[in-house]
Amino acid sequence: MDVELMVAQVFVFFAAGFETSSSSSSYTLHQLAFHPEEQKKVQNEIDDVSTELYEKYTLPGTNVTIDKGVSITIPVQALHLDEKYFKDPEKFIPERFNPDRIKDIEKCSYLPFGEGPRACIGERLGHMQSLAGLAALLHKYSVEPAPTTLRHPVSDPAARVTQSTKGGLPLCIKRRT
């Protein structure tokens, strides 16, 4: 892939991720402005759904009730390290995610991008960026632990959106021979 093709791909990602959403939202608002009766239907539906979010809620099929105003956090890292769901969860076993073995992972036990209608919309792009970045780096370089690298990094329990590691993850990068 030459620079020109990479620039074109970046432009496509930007346009696809921004311009399409912007255009469709703008056009929808434009149409709703000219159709106030449809706009009112949309607003009523939004009000109905929003009301569900701010009242007591009982999980279907259980007697567990979540009170109004209670925040729910799923401890994703704890879930990923639970032996109930993953054999030898502390071991680095990339093969456990091979296509022929992914079916062995219980649904909703591996949630790096969430699940369902609130899952991260950037999952596919995130995978592609990570794979491309790792391939580009590891094609020419190798990584080794730095003198201050901890074998078992300590997670920052205050991190909310993405996992964060106290002190970062220092590494030495060396050109491959």
Image: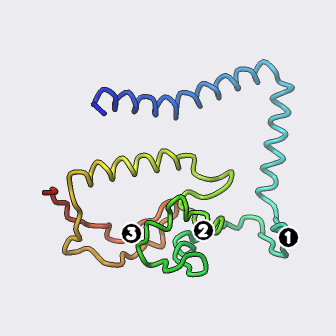
Q: Nearer the viewer, mark 1 or mark 2?
A: 2
- Quarter of the image where the N terminus is located: top left
Q: Amino acid at mark 3?
A: Thr
Residue drawn at x 41%, y 73% as measured from the top left: 92
Residue that mark 3 sits on: 165
Residue found at the far front of this picture: 100
Q: Nearer the viewer, mark 3 or mark 1?
A: 1
Q: Crowdedness of circle 2 by 10 Å Cα count: few (<14), some, many (20+)?
A: some
Name the image quarter holding residue 42: top right
Residue drawn at x 52%, y 76% as measured from the top left: 81
Earlier along the polypeptide chain: callout 2 or callout 3? 2
Q: Nearer the viewer, residue 30 or 120?
A: 120
- Quarter of the image where the C terminus is located: bottom left
Name the image quarter holding residue 101: bottom right
Dot 2 lies on which element? loop
**Residue 89 place in picture, x, y as percent:** 49, 77
Q: Amino acid at mark 2?
A: Ile
Q: Crowdedness of circle 3 by 10 Å Cα count: few (<14), some, many (20+)?
A: few
Tell me the tag on residue 105.
2
CA separation, marks 2 and 3? 25 Å
Q: Crowdedness of circle 1 by 10 Å Cα count: few (<14), some, many (20+)?
A: few
Q: Amino acid at mark 1?
A: Gly
